[in-house]
Image (cartoon, grey):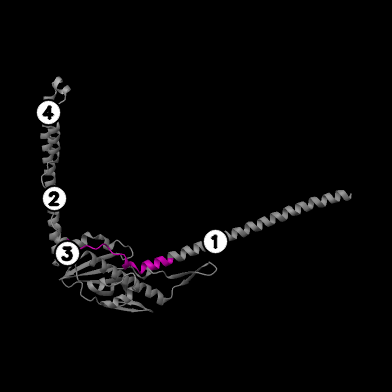
Amino acid sequence: MDLIQGELMGWKGTMRSIAAAARAAEREAQRRHKQVQKAQMIADSTSAVEEWENYVENLVSIHTDMVDMIDWHKIASQPGPREPHQASHHRDRAEMASAKFKPSIFHVFSGGSTKLRMQLEAKIDEAAVLDQKQYQDALAAHMKAVAEWENETKFAKRLLRGEAAAIRQVIEEMQSLSETALVGTAIEFSFGENFIHAKIRIHGDDIVPSMRLKQLASGRLSETRMPVGQFNELYQDYVASVALKTAGDLFHILPLDEVYVTCMANMLNLQIGHQQWIPILSVQFVRDGFMRLNLSGIDPSDAMRNFRHTMKFSKTKGFSAVEPLDSINDGTADI
């Protein structure tokens, strides 16, 4: 009886041990699952904050990515293509082969030396024809290159003289001015004597995130509403960055000493009660001053102080309408 009872207790003890091990394994699995979930949460939070920070950084650094510079002075003064000379490389090689030909005993007895010499002389004529064809091809390519050179230098000189038609042609062909999606939705140009005025329809302040993301010490993601002052200042920097980007691109592709840039926002006109494209920033950029800027180290809004500009802005209310520095519709031509 005692033996049977001992066996029963041993069996139950084994089952209890198995159950305890199973519960321990389950707890360990749950612990690991929670660790994985926490690690994923931290990774997701980190990624979300990084994406938010990158977006905000890109929003206020549009001006750091300019189109390539075109040196119109260099183009206007570049020498013309050299005229090709008539070469005789193929004929020279054929004549050398003919001169070096010495019939062997086999050729003499077989009667083939005369035939071979005639073939070599015929190759000289063929080589001369090939030399002439290559020269004619080079002449045709040279004429085309000269025509392109004349067009480029004449066009560059027209630009350097400040001809509005030439300036307009460059802008029409350089579509990269509006390729950056963050810049805005449309851009128009007006021309005056020795200057150009770019009018940009920028994005509204909804391009600025309304929420601020931050990762807490616990790794969790914190989302709080962006303070009004910070929100408006970010939008101000965005608008100024667009103006700098536009001016820089124009200076890079045109030999102008000054450009005007006006940023237009679709805002509520309190006088009429409707949305309307209203100028909120207008700047006269001067080449020398602009080229001295360290674009990667400036605050876009503060950089406006380097140039004559008009802007009405407050941290609490944002932008208000302004008058452009120079009338956009003063008889100049738009494109």
The residue closer to the viewer here, 104 or 197, is: 104
User: In percent of the image, x 78 and y 53: which residue is there?
Assistant: 13
* Cβ–Cβ under 8 Å for marks 4 and 3: no
Q: Distance of mark 3 from mark 2, alpha carbons?
A: 22 Å
Q: Which residue is mark 4?
A: 117
Report whether 67 appears left or right of 97: right
Q: Position of residue 86 (x, y in %)?
A: 10, 45
Q: Position of residue 139 (x, y in %)?
A: 11, 47
Q: Quadrant of residue 304?
A: bottom left
Q: Distance of mark 4 from mark 3, alpha carbons?
A: 59 Å
Q: Which residue is mark 2?
A: 144
The dominant secondary structure in magenta is: helix
- Residue 100 visible to an observer of this rendering: yes
Q: Does the magenta portion include 323?
A: no
Q: Distance of mark 2 from mark 4, alpha carbons?
A: 41 Å
Disc nearest the viewer among 3 and 1: 3
Q: Position of residue 201 (x, y in %)?
A: 29, 68
Quadrant assignment for the C terminus: bottom left
The residue closer to the viewer here, 315 or 17, is: 17
Q: How crowded is the residue under tag 1: few (<14 C-alpha within 10 Å), some, or many (20+)?
A: few
- Earlier-in-chain disc, 4 versus 3: 3
Q: Quadrant of residue 182?
A: bottom left
Q: Which residue is mark 1?
A: 39
Q: Quadrant of residue 236?
A: bottom left
The residue closer to the viewer here, 26 or 78, is: 78
Above or below — where is 213 with respect to 141?
Answer: below
Q: How crowded is the residue under tag 2: few (<14 C-alpha within 10 Å), some, or many (20+)?
A: few
Report helix, strand or loop for mark 3. helix
* Cβ–Cβ under 8 Å for marks 3 and 2: no
Q: Amino acid at mark 4?
A: Arg
* Cβ–Cβ under 8 Å for marks 1 and 4: no
